[in-house]
Image: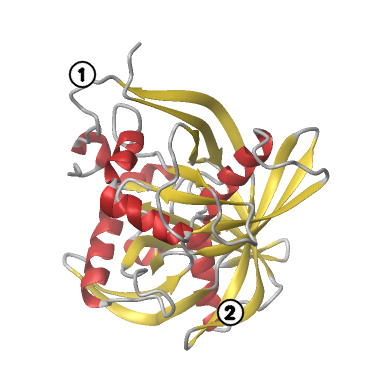
Amino acid sequence: MKSSRNITVVGCHAEGEVGRVVTGGVLPPPGDSVFAMQQYLMNHDDGFRKFLLYEPRGGAFVHTNLIVPACDPAAEAGFIIMEPTDYPPMSGSNSMCVATVLLETGMVAMTEPETRMVLETPGGLIEVVAECRDGRCERVTTQNVPCYASHLDVAVEVEGLGTLSADIAYGGAFFVIVDAQALGFQLTRDEARECVEIGERIKAATVEQYPVVHPENPDIHTVTFTELTLPVVEEDGVKTGRNTVVVSPGKLDRSPCGTGTSARLAALHAKGEIGVGETYLSRSIIDTEFGASIVREQTIGQERGIVPNISGRAWITGITQMSLDPQDPFPEGYTLSDTWYRALD
């Protein structure tokens, strides 16, 4: 078969959230940092993301990571996260998928019972500890980039919903965090579609009313996700919180969302509701779990924040060779509002 593009993709998911990993068939984009590489893709070759994520090769549920050489000498490798509408600076579930693929495919040498490595993301360096046995990566703990609460208990005016109380926090991307019960949700699977519809409205209102900019990188800005949460409770002596994160244009994160969990920890810590070293269990709408804790407090610019750990499992689901027939009329794919909530350009 004649093809104008052949890309090797390793399928993977972390606690239910799909995070495919591109391991071959594409040269790294130019740039002197992984963030600069990400910006190049976004501004000059966004068709590559659409080729991978849009139908017929992808879908609304797909995230994909491009492995690139690290620019920082402290890191073993880098990766760029591609989602249906943008390029997040960091993703916890995707970091678990990337680490699992790097180790189980032999791209990075596996050491049992524990492999330690540093990965460079667009949002900064992350430290990864992988628990390994019999050639498998059984659990990944990611020490995230520094996180902080930008706004606490602010009023967000949402048409049709009235005034909502929300926190806005950075966990590797900016989140607006809202009490799910105040909206009538218990975060069960049958509520998924309505959670998406409400979450997108809350996000749009927050973006308009509360501009946010990362204190150390002005190119990281704007609330990207809505996180709906249930109250934190104690289960077997461990603080536990159920949440779901709405990913534009309209689907729920199947995992407990690593960056969303980090953002929530930053807000809880800023309110004095969780301390350094305290264990936290984050649970998703499909009942998968991430373990979490605050490693230390850290200042980000002028903001007081934290560095959290997120821990979960990932599984490889297969290896695919994605190709493009030169006569295919949809080289960048397509979207429809039947499954994408709203069609994208």
Q: Where residue 327 is drawn, which disc sits there?
A: 1
Residue that appears at 71% across and 73% down: 277
State the count of labels.
Answer: 2
- The three-letter code of the residue at mark 1 reads Gln
The residue nearer to you, when weighing 36 against 345, is 36
Residue that appears at 27% across and 71% down: 206
Give x and y (percent) for residue 319: 53, 25
- Residue 186 can be seen in this image: no
Q: Residue furthest bottom?
A: 302
324 over 93 or under it: above or below: above
Tell me the element at label 2. Answer: loop
The residue nearer to you, when weighing 135 against 92, is 135
Left or right relative to 158: residue 266: right
| Distance (Cα) linking label 1 and label 2 | 58 Å
Q: Earlier in the sequence, mark 1 or mark 2?
A: 2
Quadrant of the drawing holding the C terminus: top left
- The three-letter code of the residue at mark 2 reads Glu
Q: Residue furthest right?
A: 113
Location of residue 136 by image quarter: top right
Q: Residue furthest top?
A: 1
Which colouring convention does the figure follow?
Answer: secondary structure
Location of residue 165 by image quarter: bottom left
Quadrant of the drawing holding the N terminus: top left
Q: Where residue 194 is drawn, which disc sits there?
A: none
Give x and y (percent) for residue 260: 48, 61
Name the residue tied to disc 2.
273
Mark 1 residue crowding within 10 angstroms, few (<14) / some (14–19) / many (20+) = few
Left or right relative to 74: residue 267: left
